[in-house]
Image (cartoon, rainbow, N blue to C red):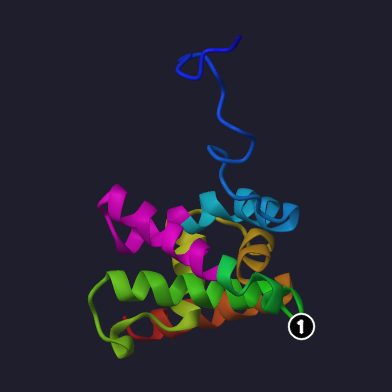
Amino acid sequence: MTNRHDSTAEPPPGLDEPPAVPLEFAAFCELHRPRYLSYARVWLPDQTEAAGAVQQAFAEIAVHWRELLGSSNPTAHAWQILRGTVGEHTRRPGPDHPAADDDLAILHYVVGLAAPEIADVIGTDTASVAGRLRRTMLREASGW
């Protein structure tokens, strides 16, 4: 005879387990979470808020995951979702959010990513990142 009130009894499979996520999405999150978090911390110095913004971005990416995978550049679309989410958390209207090239400078000079890593994060090629970083540096230097 079994005791229905036995505290050592395990719940039926699946009740306490988180919902399964596609392996590709889990790998994407594992790869990009540290870099996304470093970027968010630049704009949101409170670590809890930065982590919340990144988690919110990943939740949005998860909602659109199948659609993103069918796009020509899933990583670039995911990056735009992250940028938008971080921008919402800064409580500044859109025009005050940095230009895309300014984000590259932040990823390079503040976060410390090399051009190939930045290209991986934002979904573009290394040559494009290097050229845009040079233009940004020249634009800033001419304003000094």
* Residue 80 at x, y percent in the picture: 52, 78
- Viewer-side residue, 61 vs 78: 61
**Residue 39 visible in the snapshot:** no
In the picture provided, is 49 more to the left or to the right than 22? left
State the SS at label 1. Answer: loop
Q: How crowded is mark 1: few (under 14 residues within 10 Å), some or many (20 or more)?
A: few
Tell me the residue at 45%/54% (across/down).
37
- Viewer-side residue, 107 vs 134: 107
Instruction: Specify the segment rendered in magenta.
Output: 37-61
- Viewer-side residue, 74 vs 97: 74
- Viewer-side residue, 33 vs 129: 33
In the picture provided, is 96 more to the left or to the right than 28? left
Q: In which quarter of the image is the N terminus?
A: top right
Q: Name the residue under label 1.
A: 72
In the rendered image of this protein, does residue 22 appear above or below residue 83?
Answer: above
* Residue 7 at x, y percent in the picture: 45, 15
Farthest-out residue, top: 1
In the rendered image of this protein, does residue 26 appear above or below residue 107?
Answer: above
- Is residue 60 located in the magenta-colored stretch of the structure? yes
**Dot 1 amino acid type:** Ser
Q: Quadrant of the C terminus?
A: bottom left
Tell me the residue at 67%/58% (across/down).
25
* Residue 128 at x, y percent in the picture: 68, 79
Q: Please identify the quarter of the rendering in which residue 53 is found.
A: bottom left
